[in-house]
Image: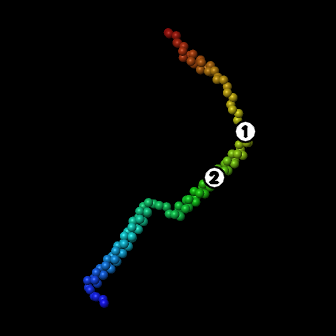
């Protein structure tokens, strides 16, 4: 026993229309949020992943080269250390007397000129 009430029929159509409108609004909001996030990320000037990985690999290679060169330098220094002649410490001498020229100059400045 089904009743044909026009009020219930109209209410069900309004509810279905509201549900589709809400689904449309939801899709529109998601699209706007996605566009907003993309614009913000583009303004940050971020590096793409493949470029980051390439630079990371170059840095790892440079670090490995640096370590190999440090080991090679240490080995070369060890090879040269015994062959290098050791310098003797300089002999300490007594303090030299002031040169005669400086002594004469100081004596000349203390002399007085004769009055004319």
Displayed quadrant of residue 6? bottom left
Which residue is nearer to you in this view: 67 or 111? 67
Q: Secondary structure at mark 2?
A: helix
Comparing 29 with 71, the one in front is: 29
Mark number displayed over residue 67: 2
Report whether 21 appears left or right of 56.
Answer: left
Element class at badge 1: loop
| Residue at the outermost top position | 116
Residue at the (30%, 81%) spot, across then down: 12
| Disc 2/disc 1 C-alpha distance (Å) | 29 Å
Q: Residue at x 56, y 61 (%)?
A: 54
Q: How many marks?
A: 2
Q: Residue 84 falls in which quadrant of the image?
A: top right
Quarter of the rendering occupied by the N terminus: bottom left
* x and y percentages locating residue 47 in the rendered image: 49, 61
State whether residue 102 is above or below residue 10.
above
Residue on which the image places disc 1: 85
């Amino acid at each position: 026993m089904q009743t044909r009430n026009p009020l219930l029929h109209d209410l069900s159509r309004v509810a279905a229309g509201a549900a589709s409108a809400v689904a449309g609004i939801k899709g529109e909001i998601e699209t706007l949020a996605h566009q907003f996030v993309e614009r913000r990320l583009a303004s940050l000037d971020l590096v793409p992943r493949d470029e980051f990985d390439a630079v990371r690999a170059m840095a790892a290679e440079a670090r490995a080269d640096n370590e190999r060169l440090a080991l090679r330098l240490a080995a070369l220094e060890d090879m040269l250390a015994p062959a290098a002649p050791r310098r003797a410490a300089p002999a300490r001498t007594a303090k030299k007397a002031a040169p005669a020229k400086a002594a004469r100059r100081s004596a000349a400045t203390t002399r007085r000129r004769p009055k004319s």
